[in-house]
Amino acid sequence: MSDYEKFLDLHHRVKPLVIANAWNVKSAQLIEKNGFDAIATSSGAIADSLGYVDGEKIPFAELLYMLERIRSCTGIPLSVDMERGYADNLNDLNTNIQKLIQKYSPADEEDGIKLMTAWPLVGGLDGLIPRV
């Protein structure tokens, strides 16, 4: 079962899904170690931990790097706080989503890629990075 399918299943069970926010590898590992079924990122906490203010002030490339580090050091699904997509127009939004997909797309193209927007929020997006 892919992380996409695991994450989707977590939203359709009787037991409520409780997710803790991570801002770096250590916090993500502690979340996993303490039995959570998935990890969420906090855009504000990641930005703050790197010396930026919240509100898409962190360069998107640095966010991608932090996501890569968290993903490579944990083994449960990861929900990504993409705020407004780090973009002011649809073309830039599409570019950033494509970067996220390319960063985490499987080596075996037969497996495909699934980027799930779990809940469009006012001013934000949540996405799932599949484990490869």
Image: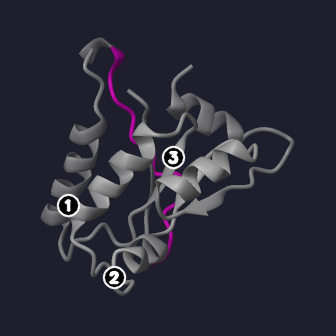
The residue under label 2 is 51
The image quadrant that residue 14 belongs to is top right
The image quadrant that residue 106 belongs to is top left
Q: Residue at x 35, y 72 (%)?
A: 84
Tell us which disc is closer to us: 3 or 2.
2
The image quadrant that residue 35 belongs to is top right
The residue under label 1 is 61
Decide if residue 70 is on the left or right side of residue 89.
Answer: right
Q: Residues within 10 Å of mark 3 (few under 14, many from 20)?
A: many
Camera sees residue 8: yes
Question: Is 118 covered by the magenta stretch?
Answer: yes
Q: Circle 2 — which element?
A: loop
Q: Residue at x 37, y 48 (%)?
A: 69
- Residue 114 percent location from the top left of the image: 39, 34
Please, what is the three-letter code of the amino acid marked with disc 1?
Answer: Ala
- Residue 12 disc label: none
Q: Circle 3 — which element?
A: strand
Question: Is 24 covered by the magenta stretch?
Answer: no
- Residue 78 disc label: 3
- Residue 72 percent location from the top left of the image: 41, 38
Sequence-wise first label, 1 or 3: 1
Between marks 1 and 3, how big is the CA–CA gap?
18 Å
Decide whether the magenta segment is chiefly helix, strand or loop. loop
Please, what is the three-letter code of the amino acid marked with disc 3?
Answer: Leu
- Residue extent of the magenta highlight: 111-122
Please, what is the three-letter code of the amino acid marked with disc 2?
Answer: Gly
Q: Residues within 10 Å of mark 1 (few under 14, many from 20)?
A: few
Q: Circle 1 — which element?
A: helix
